[in-house]
């Protein structure tokens, strides 16, 4: 059979870690690229190595799911890297088996280009293994590596994972033009029901969808890599986002939608509020979730009421710490007074303590256990549950050099040591045992 268009394979490699959970997790950036390539006329295929439900061949996997589409990932214990040997936990590969990955590749038409994504810097063993297997299966096909790890540590990615090219930063029109120049212009794409959407048709089962109404963030938090990954804050057209949600959920039968925005409430008057009104007018019976956390200062009574009316269910608030000194280091984005005002607006709108959790950062360079306990107690005092987010050092961020100075681990030489399970900057005070004690306080 003759194919008129070049074939591009998209690959999301395995997670390799001590713990992983499917909290509305999809490689949305890669799927957005897949949608662009499909709409340009390329033949596109996807293998998501993390998704054992959709991509297993010989070893079926049916995850136990919460009512909102989240659940455990399939895991396979693997040998622990030597530098992580002291961690008393199983180290696992999350997703499909190596054999099933190879079987998936064997069933494909040979691709003309392979695009591999990457997420956490300390998950690079999964990226390395995927590229090695891809190279064996398609020795003549160029392999390009992009995504977060490739953007933050391009030299390490090139040396450790050995792609043909590392493509740092977001996918651009220039990148698309280069692909067309190398592979040739594909035939004019036929209009399809999927046109304009991310490459969701790459999955057979959809328990949820993900969406972004913006890319990047106008804030410059010292611990965050958003500005490194997306140098500019770009907001999408409201009608475009609303259509994506409406068409995507209808086509793929999903009821749950997770917003991946880093700054969902920024410029809400021009973006988020009109979007919520649009969704209400459409009469969609959906449940929305904000796993990335939202800015507390920007919450208003109007926004809270519209969120409740349009179906928002899971809310994560980014408080991070209660001490003014730490809040100043985080960009002075909020205060305890504003936290109280936001909670009041949310409770009046009908949200409950079951649907709200509050992110607190722990294990920061220079942070003490007293700081953590104070933050936890202030949140609990208000009747909501804190969610402890262990700090992972990220190359290039404002905290990076300080993290490297205080950590006993070789952060600059070995990305595996960025793993937040190590609490690499927690010092003698903020240890796993100490955090387990705090989690017990939270649970009771």
Image: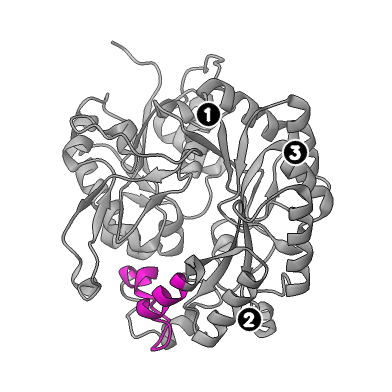
Examine the structure image and report whether residue 408 is included in the region drawn in magenta. Answer: no
Q: Which mark is residue 5?
A: none
Q: Quadrant of residue 222?
A: bottom right
**For mark 1, what is the residue?**
254
Q: Which of label 3 and label 1 is nearer to you? A: 3
Q: Position of residue 111 (x, y in %)?
A: 31, 30
Count of numbered labels shown in the rendering:
3
Q: Is residue 442 visible?
A: yes
Quarter of the picture containing the N terminus is top left
Return the disc, 3 or 1, that comes first in the chain's sequence: 1
Return the disc, 3 or 2, that comes first in the chain's sequence: 3
Looking at this view, is 167 or 243 the one in front? 243
Magenta extent:
415-440
Disc 1 from disc 2: Cα separation = 40 Å
For the rendered model, the colour scheme is one colour
- Mark 2 is surrounded, within 10 Å at the Cα level, by few (under 14), some (14 to 19) or many (20 or more) other residues, namely some
Disc 3 from disc 1: Cα separation = 19 Å
Give the dominant element type of the magenta stretch: helix, strand or loop.
helix
Q: Quadrant of residue 6?
A: top left
**For mark 2, what is the residue?**
326
**For mark 3, what is the residue?**
309
């Amino acid at each position: 059979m003759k194919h008129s268009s070049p074939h591009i394979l998209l690959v999301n490699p395995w997670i390799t870690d001590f713990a992983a959970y499917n909290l509305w997790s999809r490689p949305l950036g890669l799927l957005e690229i897949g949608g662009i390539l499909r709409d340009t006329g390329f033949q596109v295929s996807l293998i998501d190595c993390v998704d054992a439900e959709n991509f297993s061949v010989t070893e079926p996997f049916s995850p136990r799911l919460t009512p909102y589409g989240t659940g455990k990932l399939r895991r396979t214990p693997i040998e622990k890297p030597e530098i992580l040997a002291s961690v008393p936990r199983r180290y696992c590969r999350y997703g499909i088996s190596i054999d099933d990955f190879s079987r998936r590749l064997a069933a494909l038409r040979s691709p003309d280009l392979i695009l591999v994504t990457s997420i956490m810097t300390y998950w690079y063993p999964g990226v390395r293994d995927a590229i090695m297997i891809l190279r064996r299966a398609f020795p003549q096909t160029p392999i390009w590596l992009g995504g977060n790890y490739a953007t933050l540590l391009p030299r390490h990615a090139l040396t450790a994972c050995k792609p043909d090219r590392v493509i740092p930063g977001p996918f651009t029109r220039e990148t698309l033009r280069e692909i067309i120049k190398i592979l040739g212009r594909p035939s004019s794409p036929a209009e399809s029901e999927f046109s304009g959407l991310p490459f969701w048709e790459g999955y057979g089962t959809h328990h949820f969808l993900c969406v972004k109404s913006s890319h990047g963030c106008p804030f410059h938090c010292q611990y965050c890599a958003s500005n490194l990954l997306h140098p500019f804050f770009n907001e999408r057209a409201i009608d475009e986002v609303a259509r994506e949600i409406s068409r995507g959920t209808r086509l793929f039968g999903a009821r749950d939608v997770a917003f991946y925005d880093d700054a969902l409430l920024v410029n809400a008057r021009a973006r988020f509020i009109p979007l919520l009104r649009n969704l209400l007018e459409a009469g969609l019976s959906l449940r929305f979730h904000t796993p990335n956390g939202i800015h507390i200062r920007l919450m208003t009574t109007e926004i809270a009421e519209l969120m409740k009316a349009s179906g928002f269910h899971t809310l994560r608030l980014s408080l991070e710490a209660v001490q003014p000194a730490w809040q100043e280091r985080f960009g002075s984005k909020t205060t305890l007074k504003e936290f109280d005002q936001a909670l009041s607006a949310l409770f009046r709108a009908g949200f409950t303590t079951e649907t709200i959790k509050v992110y607190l950062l722990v294990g920061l360079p220079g942070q003490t256990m007293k700081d953590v306990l104070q933050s936890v107690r202030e949140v609990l005092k208000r009747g909501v549950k804190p969610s402890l987010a262990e700090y992972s050092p990220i190359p290039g961020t404002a905290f990076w050099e300080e993290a490297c100075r205080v950590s006993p681990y070789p952060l600059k030489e070995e990305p595996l040591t960025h793993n937040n399970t190590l609490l690499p900057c927690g010092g003698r005070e903020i240890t796993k045992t100490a955090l387990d004690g705090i989690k017990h306080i939270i649970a009771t």
